Amino acid sequence: MSSEQEVTRMFINYVRQSLKNERINRHKVKSHRIKETLLEDWLIEEIEDPQPLEEPNLTPKEVSKLENFIENERLAMSVATLSMPDKIVLYQYYYNELTDAEIGGRCNRTSQGVNYRRQRALNRLRTVYKNL
């Protein structure tokens, strides 16, 4: 039983790290675009209309195709089998690093409901991933 829990823990860490790496890659792309802007123009724009830099977020349509943003083909195929609500919860939890309560507040669900959905989605992912 403990070896199954260890495999489960390793798989969850793998999924978490994959989504985190994708988040870092998207941030690098955005920061690279910012560096391409002339510094003077950017500073003038910031002085005139200061806005905090936002991290790149996926639109709901992009979240529905979350598997397209995952480099590991086997994991991407596993994610493709999830429902849209499962993808949203996983994306918000691992990519946006929101808590269950914060996700629940956005989706009009309880934090327990979000936690249950996330755990169920991870179990589905694990099952599909093992069978591929």
Image (cartoon, helix red, strand yellow):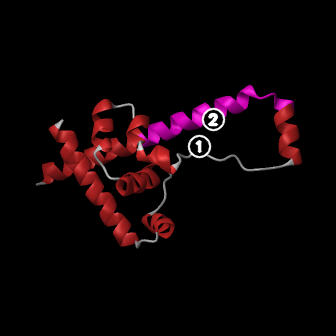
Are the residues flagged by discs 1 and 2 in contact, CB closer than 8 Å? yes
Picture quarter containing residue 28? top right
What segment carries the magenta color? Answer: 19-40
Instruction: Check the image and report above or below for 120 versus 35.
Output: below
Indicate the quadrant containing the C terminus: top left, top right, bottom left or bottom right. top left
Q: Is 30 in the magenta?
A: yes
In the image, residue 55 lies at what x, y percent?
61, 45
- Left or right of 13? Residue 123 is left
Q: Of the residues shown, which amino acid type is indicated by label 2?
A: Lys
Q: Which residue is drawn at 23% across and 51% down?
A: 124
In the image, residue 87 lies at what x, y percent?
38, 51
- Left or right of 125? Residue 109 is right
Q: Of the residues shown, which amino acid type is indicated by label 1?
A: Pro
In the image, residue 32 lies at what x, y percent?
65, 29
Q: Distance between the residues labelled 1 and 2?
A: 7 Å
| Residue identified by numbered label 2 | 30
- Asked if one can make out residue 66 in the rendered structure from this viewpoint, the answer is yes
Q: Assign a secondary structure to mark 1.
A: loop
Q: Residue at x 33, y 37 (%)?
A: 76
